[in-house]
Amino acid sequence: MAKAVVLLSGGLDSATALAIAHSRGHECFALSVDYGQRHVSELVAAAALATSIGAVEHRVIKVDLSTFGGSALTDLSTAIPAGGIKPGIPVTYVPARNTIMLSLALAWAEVLRSLDIFIGVNAVDYSGYPDCRPEYITAFENMANLATKAAIEGAKLRIHAPLLNLSKAQIIEQGNLLGLDYSLTVSCYQADEAGRACGVCDSCRIRRAGFESAQVPDPTHYRPLFP
C-alpha cells in the first residue's frame, strides 16, 4: 500500500482530501500545522477527523507565523471581514502558508519514502488566495522534484490536489459519497473554543452556500447568535 502525506487543517476541504486519499488505497499520514491561527478548534477537529477517516498517524507541527503577522488569521488586531465576499485577496490570506505547509509535508514524505502528498486547495469556490491556484501547485511539484533525494534518484513525487477544480457543492457531494462526517469539520475563521462557527466570515459563507447548492443539510455547529 502506497504511503501518502495529507495536509489536514480540520476544515471541510482538507477532510475531503484525506477521505479521497484513503479511498484510493493510500496509507495516510495526516499532518496539521499550528501556525499561530486565531483558534485551535480546527486542530482539535483535525485529530477527530484523522481518527474517523482512518489515518495511520496524525502529527501536529508548530510554526508560529503570528511572529510575522500580516494576516487577520495570525494578527488579532486585524478584524476578520464579516460583510460578505469582496473582490481581491482578503486580509485572511496568510503569507507563504501553503508553501510552508507543503514544505513540511515534503520533508515528512521524504522520511516516509512516500511519493504522494495530498492538499485540499480549491480554485473555484474560495477566497482568492494566490497559493490555491493550479499553476502554484504545478510549480511546487516541479520544485519538489528538483530538491529531493528521491526525485534525483528517479522516484518522482506528486502533489495531489483533487478538489482544485470542484465547486464547494461538488466537494461536499464527493465527501458524502465517501461517508465523510462533515459535522466533525471546522472551517470558520473565528470559531469559538467549542468549534462553533460565526456564520458571517468568508469561509462560513462559502461553506453554507456549498451545502445549500448541494441540497445537503448543513451539519455546521453555529453559535446561538448566528442570524
Image (tube, helix red, strand yellow):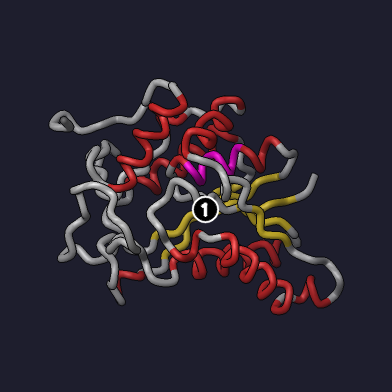
Name, please, the residue furthest toward the front: 87
The foreground one among 92 and 87 is: 87
User: In the figure, is residue 110 to the left or right of 163?
Assistant: right
Q: Quadrant of residue 187?
A: top left
Q: Quadrant of residue 175?
A: top right
Q: In the rendered structure, does residue 174 fall within the stretch colored magenta?
A: no
At x 65% / y 65%, what residue is drawn? 138
Quadrant where the C terminus lies?
A: top left
> Residue 131, percent across and down?
49, 64
The foreground one among 90 and 46 is: 90
User: In the figure, is residue 219 to the left or right of 70?
Assistant: right
Residue receiving disc 1: 121
> Residue 204, percent across and down?
31, 41
Q: How many labels does the image show?
A: 1
| Secondary structure type for disc 1 | loop
At x 38% / y 54%, what residue is drawn? 127
Residue kind at label 1, given as amino acid type: Val
Name, please, the residue furthest toward the right: 154
Quadrant where the N terminus lies?
A: top right
Bounds of the magenta segment? 13-19
User: In the figure, is residue 159 to the left or right of 193?
Assistant: right
Q: Main secondary structure of the magenta part?
A: helix
> Residue 91, percent across and down?
28, 63
Q: How crowded is mark 1: few (under 14 residues within 10 Å), some or many (20 or more)?
A: many
The foreground one among 179 and 227 is: 227
At x 67% / y 67%, what residue is drawn? 141
Judge whether 207 appears above or below 110 on screen. Answer: above
At x 79% / y 66%, what residue is drawn? 156
> Residue 213, percent across and down?
42, 28
